[in-house]
Image: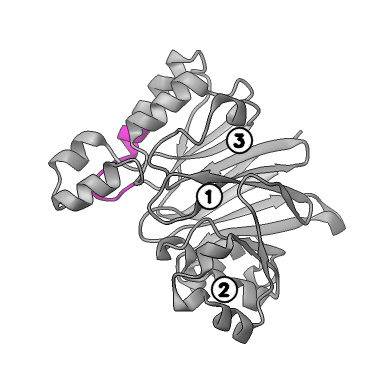
Amino acid sequence: MEVVTLASGSSGNCALIRAGSGLDRTTLVLDCGVALRTARDLALVLGVELGAVDGVLLSHHHSDHSAKVLAVAARARCPLWAHPQALTTHPSTSESERRRRKVDHRPFTSGQWFEAGSIRCLPVRLSHDAEPTHGFLFEADGVRAGFFTDLGTTDALPRELVEDLELLVLESNHDHGMLRDGRYPPHLKRRVGGDQGHLSNGQAAELLRDRCPPGLRALALAHLSERNNAPSLALEAAGQALRDAGRGELEPQVAPKRGILRLELAT
């Protein structure tokens, strides 16, 4: 299995989840909140034709995740897996628009596994101010991966949920001091730093220190704020947490705002 981030951050998110081989090869798009041309061109670098993917997943309705999911699904003529409530907020994902584009919406239920081709998916309800918001567990090729961004707390990720992960994409959105001292108005600071906002470097580090999966082999820090964080700060916090957890050999990486970060695991 491999997870590839193509875009990560408040200006747009898109990732690919790939598993299997031959006729059983499955490629899923997780969110698409960037221009189609951007996603298409980055995918082509990997040899992936965005118009021929096997499915699209939607985490939540915020436009930096949802803006182009219908367009991708329509062009690929593939299913769109999404919680029903995540599609009702914007006209661009409304039922009438799905009918017009002939998109096959396949609703999922929080906490219930479903199969998308050769990949098993578990939607995990997260604390975020787009209700509902989901992260995902993925199982394929004997590997379990987790993809969790846009969560204000780590309460939805108890030890028993993450303990078997071998690959993890985890939000590390902001540095507390930069957010506190930055130019955001007070209400936006409260939103970003609140329990329904985004995970800070410190919160991500706390999770890694206390609940680092013993079998974790690849870690990406994602959804970094351009104004309230720096890759060096996120990496420093995560790296120290991993050393504290006795996992100093594991080197975290940062998902770029635009560009490819490829995390691949073989059995």
Judge whether residue 226 is colored magenta: yes
Please report the residue visible at 42 percent of the width from the left and 49 percent of the height from the top: 256
Please report the residue visible at 74 percent of the width from the left and 49 percent of the height from the top: 119
Q: Is residue 197 left or right of residue 181?
A: right
Type of amino acid under label 1: His
CB-based contact (under 8 Å), mark 3 and mark 1 = no
**The N terminus lies in which quarter of the figure?**
top right
Q: Nearer the viewer, residue 256 or 115?
A: 115
What number is the disc on residue 1? Answer: none
Q: Secondary structure at mark 3?
A: strand
Pinpoint residue 188: horizontal percent, then vertical percent. 22, 52
Judge whether residue 260 is colored magenta: no
**Residue at the bottom extreme?**
100
Q: Label 2: which residue?
A: 70
Pinpoint residue 232: horizontal percent, then vertical percent. 32, 35
Marked residue nearer the N-terminal end (3 or 2): 2
What number is the disc on residue 134? Answer: 1
Type of amino acid under label 2: Leu
- Specify whether residue 6 is in view: yes
Marked residue nearer the N-terminal end (3 or 1): 1
The range drawn in magenta is 225-234
